[in-house]
Image (cartoon, rainbow, N blue to C red):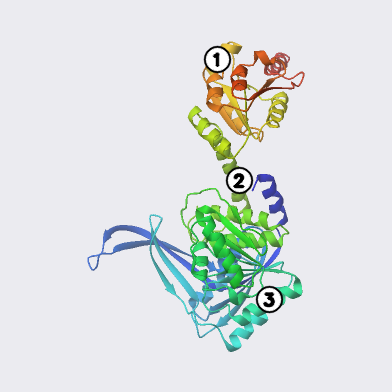
Amino acid sequence: MDLAALQHLLGELPGKRVACVGDLMVDRFVYGGVSRVSPEAPIPVLARSHELKMLGGAGNVARNIAALGGSVALVGLVGGDAEGHDASRLVGEEEPAIEGYLVTDADRPTTLKTRFISGGQQLLRVDLEESRPVTGEVEQRLIRTIRDAARGAGVVLISDYGKGVVTDAVIAAAHEVAAETGAKVIVDSKARSFARYGDIDLVKPNASELAYATDMPTETDAELEAAIARALELWSTKGVLVTRAAKGVSLGLRGQPVRHFRTVAREVFDASGAGDTALAALGLAIAAGADLDTAIGFAQLASGVAVGKAGTATVSPDELVEAVLSAHTAVVEGKVATIQRLGEEVARWRAQGLKVGFTNGCFDILHKGHVAYLAQARTWCDRLIVGVNSDASVRELKGEGRPVNDLESRALVLASLRSVDLVAPFEEPTPLRLIEAARPDVLIKGADYTEDEVVGGDLVKSWGGEVKLAEIVDGYSTSAAIARIARKEANG
């Protein structure tokens, strides 16, 4: 997802309403240090320093929707215990972004997950929970609550952790409300099978859950595609969206081939709740009118930020913008290549049947003429390599005082242009060594040259390539720009 698309979507999110139905939990994080082993057993002794409590499960989905600027109605179940009071308090602290529609069942505990952490590593998790399905009067109260909570919601999210809230009757109620309002229904579940969710819009298992549900492998793209096809045979859902950790996500819709959405690899600090973040971002984006591809890209971006944070973390719009900018910087830096990597990239492009172009220059102060020249050069090829003179090489060609900008600056500015696919610095007076390494199909220089004057032209023609001369925009040059700056400084 690029910055313009992200900023547009973020502008559409405030106030969009999502209903979230499912297993509400309290996540408790106990932090401390470990410096010794217990004399009673071969286990570490945690010296507790502090602890945090926050909403988990469906509650974490709601928190993420609120953090992204949406409005969420949270339907969940709590017990008449201290943890239930904690859950109600935590929901209240998020108002008005989260509207709590909590049903109390005095006969069951509130789900509590306690994680003991030292040095950024989880040592132990202790769960307090009751997973039997709700019945009778409690179930009926949940159904009535869903009808109230889902009014005005563009999407109904079902977060089913298998703790008893999402019964067949609760699913049916969500279907009925969605049918009346036109809302989309998306399910994220730990269930063995998704068949019981019926004709919903989308289910979101991870690769392991899909493998378990279909009894098929899901490691490779081909295996996953077969498993998705099987899932669509077994279930009535309109689509299956499979999360695959570092491999991205894969989408299967009825009557369409499976599509794979790759993701930028990120360092994982804590994966707790990353699936909740993805579900929240996906649902909120769809509620805001985004198409499915855009919503998937948004969900990937949000969950990628979440895994880099401690605990069941939320993600803010500012953090998403920062992530896109950082990714763009990494991509730009990755486009600056040594001669060895240039050869590797060209080999990869040729294997894909792509036409490779090459041009070169000093590109000291990038101006309108440069941009137009490179854009025209890119129209003659599928991938454009730009050779850029080193600082010493520029100084030899242009004289003392040049370059104005050093090699790193010039290379990164060139790499940021969409028309440029690879930037390769060279130390020699001419780029002949780069041309020999790249073996381009087309060699491009400005129309202020003749074909006979283009360095490497004969070489490129010898292997069947061609030489092209790009138009020059009159009145634009680095020397002229430097002269204008000097005149302005002299005139104060």
* Residue furthest right as drawn: 474
Residue in view at x 69 percent, y 45 percent: 4
Q: Position of residue 319 (x, y in %)?
A: 59, 50
Which numbered circle lies on residue 50? none
Which numbered circle lies on residue 175? 3
- Give the crowd class for mark 3: few <14, some 14-19, many >=20 residues within 10 Å: some
Separation of disc 2 and disc 1 at Cα?
38 Å
Separation of disc 1 and disc 3 at Cα?
71 Å
Q: Identify residue for label 2.
A: 324
Q: Quadrant of the C terminus?
A: top right
Q: Nearer the viewer, mark 1 or mark 3?
A: 1
The image quarter in which residue 379 lies: top right
**In the rendered structure, which amino acid carries the disc numbered 3?**
His
Q: Sequence order check: which comes first, mark 2 or mark 1?
A: 2
**Is residue 12 toward the left or the right of residue 189 in the image?**
right
**Is residue 49 toward the left or the right of residue 45 in the image?**
right
* Residue furthest bottom as drawn: 136
Q: Position of residue 22 (x, y in %)?
A: 58, 73
